[in-house]
Amino acid sequence: MMALRTLSCVLMMLSVVSLPRAAQHAAPEPGITGLVLAPDGSPVTRGTVGLLTAPIAGRVSVTATIDRTGHFRIVADAPGRQPLHISVPGYAPYRANVTVPPSRTMSLPDITLLEATHFHARFVTTDGEPIAASGLRRRSLDVDGATVLDPLEHVRERTDLDGSITIGPLPPGRTLLAFDRAPFAQTRLPDANVTAVKRFIDRGTITITTGSQLHVDIVDDAGQPVPTHDVWIEDAIQPSPLSMVTVKTNEQGRAIFDRLALGRYRVWTRFTRRCGGTEPTMSRLVATGNSGIAHLRMVIDGRAAFRITTTLGPVLGRGVSLTPDPAPLPQRVSVSGRRLPIATTMPRGCSGVTDSDGRVVLTPFPAGPAQLRVSLFNSSYFANVNVPESGREMAIAVPVGLIPVKVINRTSQHPVEAQLTWVGGGGRVETLTNANGDALMEGVGTSGGTLTINAREHQTVEGVFDETPETMQEVALMPSPVSRLTVRVVRADAKVPGDAVVELLARGPADVAEFAVTDAKGIATFTDVPPGPLHFSAHADGFAPTTVQIDEGSRASIVITLTRAR
């Protein structure tokens, strides 16, 4: 009996000793934690939180649920900056970027959701018959015009008993929508501007027609049809939710586009012959009606002839390039219902060299608006031209006038490599400064204009001149606000609070917040910071949250001092 008692005491002593040792060596459990609140400040009772490892593809790596008290804990697979998405039914989707520390542990400040905004519309035929509108095309953009992803499938579509459709909750920003259901016309709808103030965007009843066709005839310089030739079309207003496909011409050289709604479209095609080392493209704007057939004829040939002169005589032996205006966007194709850009950019334009008379002929080149570039000795002269169908020679007179420019950094006084643009006298001149910050602009004319100077990591400068200056223009550029910032968090006694979280507040409902954890020195680092005034908020256990406003001139040293919470 005594032996059993002794063994029991020994075991108890071992257990008492071993527990503190295990606790002493246990690492804190990793995880990003937070509390999600409704707009009225009450905790939400459900929802999903997700982290994206592949933001471009929109793939969620890990997810977690929000419990009935509004709290969540999500464990990141790896450290680094990652998009965080929160989906709570009945509220606007929430987006932020979190810079996960190596410990993969951070406690976010309370997150307050915005009210939901829904889009509603009813679609009918021209006879007033309702049309089911399931599968509307939509694309949401944020404050910077970037596409807003929906990895948690927060935005839902609901078809009501009257055949109308309700979509939401929509993310703050601008949502582009299009009706796309055969055999009706693919119709772009008015954009929905979501400000988190208006809870319902009702477009009422929208009539959808069967649409019209567009017949595009592609012919060569002899007027003969060009079969099996690529033609593509796009909405004239970009960006657009419309999904267009590339069509090949038939044996008669005709490409047919159908289900086009009333509006304006831009039709593109490329030439079958090269001009120098490039393959020119051409485009035409066309308007379509609610029904019927619209026709467009495109001649993928032609020539552009120029004689380039100055007051001193012909411009000889200089490079000339000509680009159709506007420049083509990357071609898009439809793959399983998704619009994907082709990996390579299409070559465009045409180039040549002037002869002893200043003449140059560029072929093949389409008739229509184009941008001409003449390479001078120290700069390039640009002019907008309209190439005639006849191919007759056009006279281009490069203006006289020179502007010497020197660009330096206002702070360091060091030379700056910058791009200079002069607009005046009916043309445009561009050049770059050399390593010494010097440049000579030619062909600027004498009647005045606007000089714009752009340099990497510097603020842009623009000056307006009533008369073209004849003397050296020395311009000192201010360094631009850096996009990578550090924020130091300290206590009132100058010591560093442990594991503080710093938030770069969103600029508005359509922007995202940024969260970062301070390191051992109390420093939190932010990348891709936008220009303009900024608001930072620091949070740490036992301290009152503190928010500061930072203007562009105060980004070099940002310090937030925390005080004890009362």
Image (cartoon, rainbow, N blue to C red):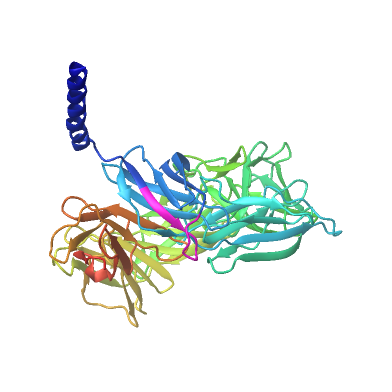
How far from the left and from the top, in percent, is residue 156?
A: 62, 50
Whether residue 60 appears in this view of the structure is: yes
Whether residue 389 appears in this view of the structure is: no
Q: Quadrant of the N terminus?
A: top left
Q: Quadrant of the C terminus?
A: bottom left
> Could you say which quadrant of the image residue 80 lies in?
top left
In reply to whether residue 42 is colored magenta, the answer given is yes
Residue 188 shown left or right of residue 293 in the figure: left
Point out the residue furthest to the bottom here: 466
How far from the left and from the top, in percent, is residue 558?
A: 21, 64
Residue 555 shown left or right of residue 41 in the figure: left
**Which residues fall within the magenta stretch?**
33-44
Residue 306 against residue 55 in the figure, above or below: below
State the residue at coordinates (17%, 24%).
10
Residue 336 shown left or right of residue 109 in the figure: right
Residue 211 shown left or right of residue 82 in the figure: right
In reply to whether residue 360 is colored magenta, the answer given is no
Front in this rendered view, residue 101 or 329: 101
